[in-house]
């Protein structure tokens, strides 16, 4: 069994594009990692010229984001969303709800530009 909390980790947080940088490195991210690992091993055959052993391993691991820099509750970096209270190794994807077949299908008030 193990449980470990890492504190004040660095995270490149997004900044407004007007600054001219892609992000700013800040410390203050806290993560808790915990889990259980179990290994069973048995010597099935032990002879002078032949030996056979087998092992079975099972594990359960999880992590949880405890804090983000600057007291933030959520940060989006690329295709990853870091949210306090949720696992760190998850990611999110945008889902396509379809395409418009013609200009007439576009709901009123929405505009778009067709590129050549």
Image (cartoon, rainbow, N blue to C red):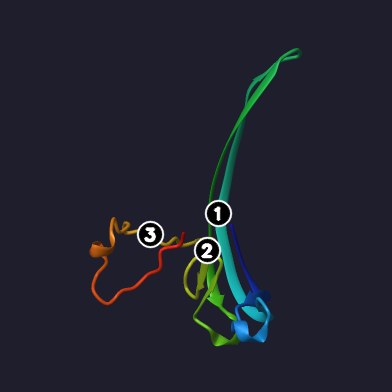
Horizontally, residue 21 falls left or right of residue 102, namely right
Say whether disc 1 or disc 2 marks the residue closer to the N-terminus: 1
Which residue does the numbered mark 1 point to in the structure image? Answer: 36
Tell us which disc is closer to us: 3 or 1.
3
Q: Residue at x 29, y 55 (%)?
A: 101
Q: Disc 2, disc 3: CB below 8 Å?
A: no
Say whether disc 2 or disc 3 marks the residue closer to the N-terminus: 2
Which residue does the numbered mark 3 point to in the structure image? Answer: 95
Tell us which disc is closer to us: 1 or 2.
2
Query: In the rendered image of this protein, does residue 102 appear above or below residue 48?
Result: below
Tag 2's secondary structure?
A: loop
Query: In the rendered image of this protein, does residue 90 appear above or below residue 51?
Result: below
Q: Position of residue 10 (x, y in %)?
A: 68, 75
Which residue does the numbered mark 2 point to in the structure image? Answer: 79
Q: Position of residue 58 (x, y in %)?
A: 54, 44
Q: Closest to the observer: 78 or 74?
A: 78
Label 3, label 1: how far apart the Cα atoms are: 35 Å
Q: Most extreme residue toward the front, as rendered?
A: 116
Q: Most extreme residue toward the right, as rendered?
A: 48
Query: In the rendered image of this protein, does residue 114 appear above or below residue 13?
Result: above
Q: Position of residue 16 (x, y in %)?
A: 59, 84
């Amino acid at each position: 069994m193990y449980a470990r909390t890492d504190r004040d980790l660095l995270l490149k947080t997004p900044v407004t594009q007007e600054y001219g940088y892609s992000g700013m490195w800040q410390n203050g991210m806290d993560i808790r990692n915990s889990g259980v690992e179990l290994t069973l091993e048995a010597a099935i055959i032990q002879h002078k010229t032949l030996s056979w052993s087998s092992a079975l391993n099972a594990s359960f691991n999880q992590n949880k984001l405890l804090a983000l820099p600057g007291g933030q509750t959520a940060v989006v970096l690329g295709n990853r969303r870091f949210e306090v209270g949720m696992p760190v190794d998850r990611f999110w994807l945008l889902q396509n709800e379809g395409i418009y077949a013609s200009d007439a299908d576009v709901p009123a008030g929405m505009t778009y530009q067709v590129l050549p």
